[in-house]
Amino acid sequence: MKDIRKVYYPDIVAINNATFSLAEGEIHALAGENGAGKTTLMKILFGLEKADKGEIYFNSELINIHSPVDAMKRRIGMVHQHFMLLENLTIADNIVLGIEPKRKGLYDYKKACEITRELGTKFDMVIDPEKRISQLTVGLKQKVEIMKVLARDARIIILDEPTAVLTPQETKELFHQLMLLKKDNYTIIIITHKLREIKEICDRVTIMKAGNIVGTYDVDKISIDEISKKMVGYDFEVSKLKSNVKPGKIILDIKGLSLTIGGKKRLDNISFSIREKEILGVVGVEGNGQKELSQVLNGEIKNYDGDIVLDDFSLKGESILEIRKAGISYIPEDRMVDGANLNGSIYESAIVLKSKEKEYQNGIFLNGRKLEEFTDSLINDYGVKCNSKYDDVKSLSGGNIQKIVSAREIVDARRVLIANQPTRGIDIGAVMTLHEKLKSLQSQDKGILLISSDLKEIYDLAESVIVLYDGKVVARINNIKDVNEEQLGRYMLGIDVQENMGASL
Amino acid sequence: MKLKDRLVSYSKKRGFSFQTFFFESLKTIMAVLIAYLIAIIIILIVSDKPSESIYWFVVGPFSNMMEFGELIKKAIPLMFAGIAACVIVKANQFNLFTEGAFYVGGLVAALIAIYIKLPAVLAVIAALVGGGLVAAIFGYIPAKLKSSLNVNEFVSSIMLNFIVLWIGVYLISNVVIDDASGDTATQIIPEVSKLKILFSGTNISYGLLIVVGIVILVKIFFSKTLPGYEIKMTGDNENFAKYSGINVQRRVVMAQTLGIFIAGVGGATEILSNYHRFNWKTLPGYGFDGFMVTIIAKNKPLFVPLAALFIGYLRAGADLMAFNSDVAQEVVAIIQGVIILLIASERFFSSSFFKRLLDNYKERRDAQRMDVMKNE
Amino acid sequence: MNSFWDLFSSVNFYVTIIALATPIIFASMAALISNKAGIVNISIEGTMLVSALVGAIFSTLFSSAIMGILFALVAGVLMGYLFAFSTIKLKTNEILVGIAINILAAGLVVFIIYALTGNKSDYSSVPLKTISIPLLRDIPIIGKIFFDSLNLLVYLAIVVIIAMSFFLKKTVLGVRIRSVGMNAKAVDSIGVSSEKVKLIALLIAGGLAGLGGAYMSIGFMSSFNTGMIAGRGFIGLAAEAIGAGIPYVTALFAVVFGLVNAFSLTAQTITGINIPYELLNTLPYFVTIIGLVIFAVIKKRRNKNNI
Amino acid sequence: SGSSTDTVITTDDGVFRVVLLVNGNLGDMSFFDSANEGIDRLNETYGDDFEATTIEMGTNQSNWETTLYRVSKQNYDLIICATTQMREQLQRVSKSYPNQKYLIFDTEIDDGKASSYPNVHSIVFRQNEGGFLAGVLAAKMANGTSGMESPVNATGKVGFIGGMRNNIIYDFAVGYAMGIEYVNNDALNQTSLMTSFVGNFSDSTQAKALANVQYSNNADVIFVAASQAGLGVIDAAETQNRYVIGVDSDQYSYYKNSNPSRAELIITSVLKEVGDVIYDSTVKFYNGELEFGVLVTYGLAEGIIDIADNENYQSLVPEELRLYIDGLKTQIIDGDLVITSRFDLSLDEVDQLFESLE
Ligand SMILES: Nc1ncnc2c1ncn2[C@@H]1O[C@H](COP(=O)(O)OP(=O)(O)OP(=O)(O)O)[C@@H](O)[C@H]1O
Ligand SMILES: Nc1ncnc2c1ncn2[C@@H]1O[C@H](COP(=O)(O)OP(=O)(O)OP(=O)(O)O)[C@@H](O)[C@H]1O
Ligand SMILES: [Mg+2]
Ligand SMILES: [Mg+2]
C-alpha cells in the first residue's frame, strides 16, 4: 500500500500518508493509539472504504480494490473489530454466507456443517457447527469470524484487535491457531494494543500515529518499551494550564462496581472516588471497561452490583434524569448519535438541559429570550464556528459539534462532570478551549471524571488517574507526576499491575 | 435597518437558509408538476373533451366564490388531520387512530350536542372538547401499548379503527338512533351546538378559525413549550433525548394522544359544520389523508394548512371535473400518490441532486468558456 | 342455526374459516418475507387491491381464471417493485411509501374500472372452480372440508406456507434474506449486496400479495369490488407480528382470525345469541389486538430473561 | 309558485333537462342502477328534446348538499334524488330554490309534511308487499308444499340477508316475515327465518360468507336486500347450488346471458321498478301532469312493486304455486289483504317479529 490518504467527511484526516508492505507468510502487527488510523487503513485494503489517494500493489501488480469482493478475489480476508455475525443463525450458516454450498439448487446445510467441521479440525478449533451465534462466548465468536475468512480461502488475514475481547486462555488458543496458520504459509496482519502479544507471535510490527506510519520494525530488534514510546511519541511537558488546586472532600464515591453482560465481566469490582476540585483521569485501551463505566455512572445501565454515592446519597438504580438532577453531567462519547440532535438546530441541542429549569421558563412557556442568550453565550464562550445559532447541527464540523456538547454539559455540571473522550477528533484550538473550560470547572469545587484515550490530555489536565484493564482498576496514581508515560502505558497494556490493586492477570 | 437586512436577519434567526428553502420548494414544485403532468396525460387519454375536463380540474375551484368555498371546506378536515398527524410524526410515530378519532370525535360531539343542553358558546365548546377527549382516550391505547410493550402502533391503531367504527355503527343503529330520520342516524344536532357559516355565500364554517387556531397553538407548542420541544427532540433523535434526561416514553405517548385529540376535535368540527345528524357508517378516510398532508408540509405545522389547501384544491377540482365532464374524480388519488412518493423521497430531487446539477452545469459552462477562449 | 353444537359440527363452518383465512395467509406471508428482509411493508393492502382488479380483468379477457391469477401475480410483483424502488433506491421512509401506495391503489382501481365499464364499484371475473378430489373427498368430515369445497388458490396458500418455511431455511436466497434482516451490514461486509436481496424479498412479497388479491376476486368471489380487501392486508401484518416471523405460527394466527371472523358471522344466526351484528363484527379486530399484546408480553419476558 | 299544482315547465334553452343525483356510486345492479336505467330510457325515447343525466356524488356525504345546490343553480327542469340520506339536504335546498322542481324517491321529503314543500314531489314504495310475496314463495319452498324439484330440500328454513338495518331494508324484511307467517298460519310444517346483516352495502365478501353460513345451515332460499353487497349472496348461491331471491330489479336478467348457471338460481327478484317510476314521473312532468307538494306511494297496485315473473320463475315454480301467489297479489291489489309494514311497527316490534320466526 503506497501513499494512502483517507479523509472522512467532512474533514477528519484518518490516514494522512501511509505506506505499508506485507511479506508472505509473516505475522505482521499494526500498532498505534486509538484513532491512529489502523482500522481505516485495513478497511481500505479490504475494500470497505475507498482511499482518496494512493495505490495498492499485489505481488508488484497495481490492483484496484473497490469492494470486499475484489479483496476476496485476491484472497484477502478481514476479521472486524466489531463482529459482523448474524446472531440468530448457526455457526455453519455464518461461515458459508455468500459462498453457500448447494445441492440440487438448494442450500446444503449439511455440507455447510461439514465444511465448518473440516475447517475446525484443520486449524485445531473445536466448534459445533449447529450452535447459534447468540449462544456463543466472545472467544468462540472470534473463532467463527476467523473461520469465515478461512472458508473464503483467504491467504492474507487481517485481524482487527482480535484479543481485545478475549480472556487470556482464549488469547493463548488464538495464538496457537495463528501459529498453525503461519506454518501453512498464511499471511496475517494483526491490529493490537497489547504489546506483549506483538512480542509473542509477530515477526514485524508497523507503528502508526495520527494517520502516519512511524515505521516498520523487526520484532526481534525492538523492545516493548521502544514500541510504546514510538506509539505515544511526544514529549511529556506538563502543561502550563495545570493549576495547583488542592482537592477537597469526596463528592462521588464508587463502591465495588461489577457488571456482567453476555457472560463476560465488563466491570470487575471497581472502586474509586472523586473529590472536589479533582480531575480524575480514567485511562485504558479502548474496550477495557470505560464504556460500561460511563454507562453505569450516567444511569443508562441500572442492573449493576455495587453502589454509587454522591454527597452521601446513593444513586443506585436511578434513571438518567434523576442522576442529572442530582448534579452529575455527562459528555457522551459519541457526539453524533448521543450528544447532539443532528436533525435539529444548534439552539435545540444547546438548550436541552437548561430548558428544564424553572429559571428558563415563563409559566408554561420556555423563556425563549433567556435560552437564546444562553445559547449565544455558549457559542461565544466556546468559540463555536457557525453562522447563527439556528444553523443545522449537521452543517457543523465534528469539533464544533463537540464544543456545543461539551459546553452544554460543562455549564450544567453542578457536582460532577463525566467527560467521555471530550476532545476526540477535534482540532488543537478547540482542544485548548475545552481544556481551559474543564479547568475552570475544577476551580469551582466540582469533580471531573475524565475518560480519555489521549494520554497527553490526561497529563495536561488530571491530578490523579486510574488505569482500567480488562474491567479492573489495575493502577491508581494519586499524583500523576509520580508516573511517567511509559509506566502508564505498561499498566494500560496489562504488562504491569500496581501492587495492592488485588488484580491478577 | 433596511427591509432586506431585516428579512435576512429574521430568516437567520429562524434557522432559515435561502438555499435550502429554494431547493426544498423546487423539489415540491417539481413533484407537483410531474404529478399534474401525469394527470393531464391520463385525462387526455380517457376524456372525450379533454380541454373542458382540464379546465374544470385546474380552474374550476376558482370559478366563483361558492366553489372556492368548497375548496376551503374540503381543506378544513384535511388541516385537522394534517396537524394531528404532524404532532404524531414529530415524535416519529405512526398512530393511525387519527382515522378512528375523526369518527369518535364526530359521534361524541353529536351526542353531547343532542343530549346535554348547554347555552350557546358552551354547547359548541363542550361538543368539540368532548369529542376530542373521548377520541384521545381511545388513542391512548395504541400509544401506551407502543411505549410500554413495544406493540407496533401502526397495526394496533388500524385494528382499533375498525373496532370504534363498528361500535359507532352499533350505537347509531340501535341506541341513539332517531327513528324519525328514516336513516340510521342520531337525532338532529341542535342549532346552538352547530358551527355557523363564517362567510356567507360559501359553506366555510367557523371550523376554519378553530383549525387555524389549533395550527398556531401547535406551532407555539413545538417552538415555545418544554413538552413540545422534548417531543421534537425525541422524534429527531431518541438517543440524544434519552441521554439528556428526557422521558422518552412519556413524550411518545403524549404526542400520540395529543395528535389523536386534535383529530377528534376535527371529527367534531366536521360533524358540527357540515352535518345535521351523525350518520357515518364507514370511516371517513381522513386518517391516512392527514399523514399525506403532513408529508407534503414537510412536517412543519405552519405549512400544514397550505398542504391541506393544495389537496383541497386538487379534490375540489376533481369534483368539478367529475361533475361537469366525463373523467372520474379518482384521478386525484393517482396524483396524490405520486406527489407523496416524490416529496418524501430523500434521493429524488434532493438538495444534493440540485447541487450536482448546478455543479455539472457550471463545469460544462466553464469548459465551454475555455473552449471559446481557446478558439479565440 | 340452533346451537353452538350445530355450528361446530357443520362442515361449512370450517370451509368458511378456510375461505376467510386464505387471503390473510397470503398477506401475512408477504408481510413475513418483507419483515425477514428488515422491511415493514404496509403496501400489501394496496397491492392486494390492485392485483384483485387486474386478476378480475384478465380472467375475463382470457376467459380463464388461471390467466387472471397469473396477471394478478405480475401486478403484485410490479407493485412490489414500486415499493422497493422507492424505499431502496430513493431512500423514502417505508411507512410513507406504504401510505402513498395504498392511497394510489384505492384511487387507481376505481379509476380503471370507471374507464373500462363506466361504473365505479365492481368488475366481474371468471372465478376459479372448486376442486373435488375423488376418493379423498369420501373421507368422512375431512374429505368434505378439505377435498371437496376448496379451490386452487386455497391449496396454493397452504403450499405457500410450507414453501415459505422451506425457502427461508433451505435455500441460499432464503438464508440471505434472513441475514439481511438481521444485519445488513454484515451481509454487505462479505460482498453480498443487501439492497439486491431486499429487492428480491419485496418482489416476492408483492407477488404473494398479488395472489392474495387474486384470491379475493377470483378465488372467493366471482367479481372484483373496490371495498373487498377491507383491511385484510393490515390483518396480514398483524398476523405476522403475532407469529413472530415463524411461517407456521403466522399462518396459524391467520386461521385463528378466519375462525373468529367466521364465528362472528355465524353467530348472527345462532338462536339465543342476541349480540348485535355490529358488535360481533368487532370481534376479529379485538382478537388481533389481544394477540398483539400477548405476543409483545411474551417477547418482553423473553428479552428480560436474556439479560 | 306556492300552489301544489304549479307545473309550468321552464325550458329556457328549448331543451328539457333532468338530472338524477346518485348519493353513492352506480354499479349496485339494483337500486341506483335501476334508477339510472330510467334515465337512459328517457334519453333513448325522447333523445332530441330531453337531456337526462346522472351524477354520481360518491360516498363523501359532505359533498351531497353542495352538489344539490350546484345543480339547483344550473338550469335543470327537474332534479331527482333519493333515499332518506338526502331528504334533509333537500328540505333545505328546496326552500332556497322555490322555483326549481325536485323529485325525491324512496322517502317522503318530511314525514307527513309533503305539502309544506310545494316544489318537491315525494315517492315512496310499498316494498313490504313484494317482500310478502317473496316470503310466501320462500316458505312454500321450505315447508315442502311448493311442488318444486331439486335443489330445494324442504328443510323448513329460509334466510334473509340485509345490508344494514334501515327502514327500507326492514320494510322488505318485515314483508318477507309476514309472508312466512302467512304460510305458517295454515301449514303443518313451520318455516323458520334466519336474518343476517352485512353492516354495509358494499362488502360483498362479508355478504358471501354470511350467505354461506345460512345455506350451510340449510336455508332453502335466501332473500337478499343489500345492494352491491348482495352480489356476494348471489355468488354464494351459485357455489352452494341453492336458490336466492334478488331485489330491486330483475337480477336474473342481468346474468341471463353472462352467467346462465348463476342466473338460473335467482328464482325471482322482488321488483321495485324505480326506473319505471322515474321514467313515468318525468314524462308526466314534461306533460305538465306531475303534482308537487305531494307524497305518492307505489306498490303492487301500481305495478311498481312485484316479483319478477320471468322465464326462469315460470320454469322453476310450478303453475299451481304461481297461481296461488297471483291470487294473493289480487287480494293485495284489491285491498283485501293488507301487509304490515315496517312503518306500522316500532324497532323493538320488528326485532320481536324476527325472533318469533327464528
Ligand atoms: N466512518 C467514519 N467517519 C468519520 N470519521 C471516521 C470514521 N471512521 C473512523 N473515523 C476517524 O478516523 C480516524 C481513524 O480511525 P480508525 O478507526 O482507523 O482508528 P484506529 O487506529 O483503528 O483506532 P482504534 O484503536 O480506536 O480502533 C479517527 O479519528 C476516527 O474518528
Ligand atoms: N461522521 C463521523 N464524524 C466524526 N466521527 C465519526 C464519524 N463516524 C464515526 N466517527 C467516529 O469514528 C470512530 C470509528 O468509527 P467507526 O465505528 O465507523 O469505524 P471503526 O471503529 O474504525 O470500525 P471497526 O469497527 O472496523 O474498527 C468512532 O469513534 C466514531 O464515533
Ligand atoms: Mg480500530
Ligand atoms: Mg475504531
Image (spheres, rainbow, N blue to C red):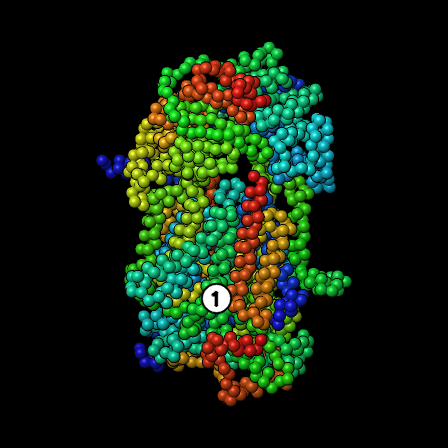
Q: Nearer the viewer, residue C4 or B31?
A: C4
**Residue at image location 51% in from the left, 65% down from the top:** C278
A153 up-or-down from B224: above or below: above
The residue lying toward the viewer, choosing from A400 and D141, is A400
Image height check: is A487 above or below B233? above
| A294 on left or right of A437 | right
Say which quarter of the image contains residue B175.
bottom left
**Which residue: 66% across, 35% down?**
A91
Residue D134 percent location from the top left of the image: 57, 79
- As drawn, is C67 to the left or to the right of D56? right
| Quarter of the picture holding the C terminus of chain D | bottom right
The percent coordinates of residue A252 (x first, y second) are 42, 29
Q: Of all residues shown, which one is farthest toward the top?
A: A221
Element at label 1: helix
Position above or below: A249 against C8: above
Residue on which disc 1 sits: B170
Q: Chain of mark 1?
A: B
Residue in front for this viewpoint, B198 or B278: B278
In this view, the residue in front, A285 or D122, is: A285
Q: Would residue C239 be found to the left or right of residue A392 on screen?
A: right
Q: Say what amino acid the circle numbered 1 marks.
A: Tyr
Q: Quadrant of residue C306?
A: top right
